Amino acid sequence: MKVRKLTVDDLNDIMTLQTLVYEDLQNKMILETIDEPEFTEMIEQGFIIGVFEEEDLKAIRAMYIPPIDDPEHLAEDGGIKDREEVIYSEISFIHPDCRGQGLQTKLGRQLVERVQADGRFKHILTTVLPTNIPSLKDKFRLGFKIVNTRIMYGGKYRHVMQLNLNEPLEAAGEKKTVDYKNIEWMLDHGKDYIGFDFDGENIDYYLK
């Protein structure tokens, strides 16, 4: 398998793989699908890579530079003042035949390195469905922390997770261990605590 940057020539393969992965999911809420114009914009921005087995696209991961005037900009959740320093970890999906090989995290590490090398950004932000354990584990492995939990995307629960590239978030205040399914606590206290660790059952939160 080889990894390379994706181009507009890969667009049809990207859309086909996204449809295949989405249709295979039992819980469709796990994947927020993206349309062709959005993928085209991400390709133009340059932070989208894919895994190929010979000529077949098997996995993709992308980051996205959001408009700084977006009213739903995630910088607010992280208390980030300069929105131009923010890029989003936007989407990833793996062909069902290739799951369990750690491809999501491998691609994530490569993209983080590309963002660091670019030099324009200090923060990577993303959203995660609280019950999506594989995605949560992936983000924590990459160094992301939970900085808020709220309702977005038309009524869906999401963690907002943040990775600082220059000055990592630090655990300083009172510790609180919370069951990952305790969404009500997270909605009530998410702005006051940072989620630092996840063992598959509980998340360790620290007071900001």
Image (tube, grey):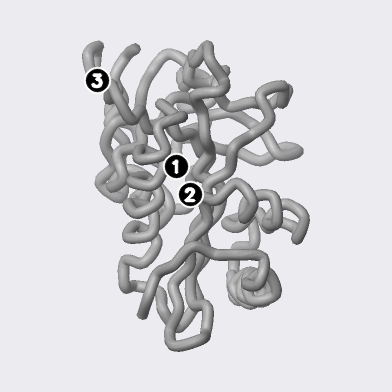
Identity of the amino acid at label 3? Glu
SS at circle 2: loop
Identity of the amino acid at label 1? Lys
The residue labelled by disc 2 is 131
**Mark 1 surroundings: few (<14), some (14-19) or many (≥20) residues within 10 A:** few
Up/down of 100 relative to 183, above or below:
below
Direction bottom: furthest residue: 54
Q: Disc 3 or 2, which lies upstream in sequence?
A: 2
* Residue at (37, 45) in percent of width and height: 112
User: Where is residue 30 drawn, in percent x and y?
Assistant: 57, 56
Identity of the amino acid at label 2? Thr
SS at circle 3: loop
Q: Disc 3 or 1, which lies upstream in sequence?
A: 3
The residue labelled by disc 1 is 181
Q: Distance between the Cα atoms at labels 3 and 2?
A: 24 Å
* Residue at (68, 56) in percent of width and height: 39
Residue 173 lies in quadrant: top left
